[in-house]
Amino acid sequence: GAGVSQTPSNKVTEKGKYVELRCDPISGHTALYWYRQSLGQGPEFLIYFQGTGAADDSGLPNDRFFAVRPEGSVSTLKIQRTERGDSAVYLCASSSPTGSYNEQFFGPGTRLTVL
Amino acid sequence: KQEVTQIPAALSVPEGENLVLNCSFTDSAIYNLQWFRQDPGKGLTSLLLIQSSQREQTSGRLNASLDKSSGRSTLYIAASQPGDSATYLCAVKAGNQFYFGTGTSLTVIP
């Protein structure tokens, strides 16, 4: 079936604006993760959903960042009052409770640039 | 907090060589370890996943080992090819979170 998809692939915004990044996980995957990757670094954990609820949001850097997953499938990462330091690639991953448990499958990412 | 380190940061080898990439982690209380490759400007592709109770996993020319007690994993690539050129990342799962290393950038020279 289809893999994890993310939209948009690129987003350029101005400092202070609000942005939404979307993740569509693999069908049937109940776990969903958001990461942020800066140039030359590994992905940094932001938030983990199990179903509709955020099971662990300890990686969100501050209260400008928020994520939802209202129906347990598509998730949206929301960033308010964007800052230049928010520029990074935002990656989404999903995993299934069956099969190779906890193997993560990643989307292609959204490259966010804050001018 | 779990810290994951990958050595070397970059590696360049001629085609056909066998090579080893290293990953170390500071806390042995992990659930699993996963190796990924990342091509420039792309997302991560899963290569191998090793559960904490396992010692190694193999897929084609790739073999990954895990020594949880010493906090180490290696990724062995046999008979390297130019198409193997990419950044290789390891990640460990501890609790709900996955912790990534900064990766090894591999270049295989034809």
Image: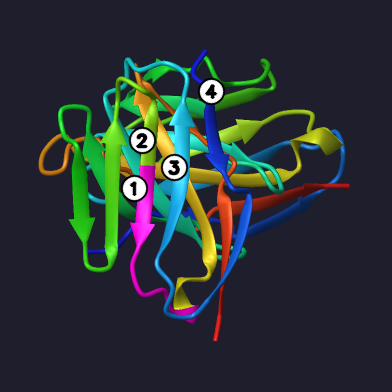
Distance Cα–Cα, label 3 vs label 4: 12 Å
Q: Residues within 10 Å of mark 1 (few under 14, many from 20)?
A: many
**Residue located beneath label 3 in the image:** B90
Residue under disc 2 on the same chain as residue under disc 1: yes
Secondary structure of the residue carrying tag 4 is loop
| Residue range of the region highlighted in magenta in the rendering | B74-82
Q: Chain of mark 4?
A: B
Place of residue A2 in the rendered image (x, y in percent of width and height, measured from the top left): 28, 63
The answer to the question of whether label 4 and label 2 lie on touching residues, with beta carbons closer than 8 A, is no
In which quadrant of the rendered view does residue B60 lie?
Answer: bottom left
Colour pattern: rainbow
- How would you rate the neighbour count of disc 2 (Cα within 10 Å): few for under 14, some for 14-19, many for 20 or more? many
Residue visible at 72% across and 28% down in the picture: A80
Query: Does residue B47 sit above or below A32 in this rendering?
Result: below
State the SS at label 1. loop
Q: Is residue A102 left or right of residue A77?
A: left
Amino acid type of the residue that numbered disc 3 sits on in the rendered structure: Cys
Q: Residue at x 39, y 25 (%)?
A: B71
- Compare marks 3 and 4 and give the one earlier in the sequence: 4
- Of badges 1 and 3, the one in the foreground is 3
Residue tagged by mark 4?
B3
Alpha carbons under labels 3 and 2: distance apart: 19 Å
Both marks 4 and 2 on one chain: no
Residue A41 visible at all: yes
CA separation in Å, label 1 and label 4: 28 Å
Quarter where residue B74 is shown? top left
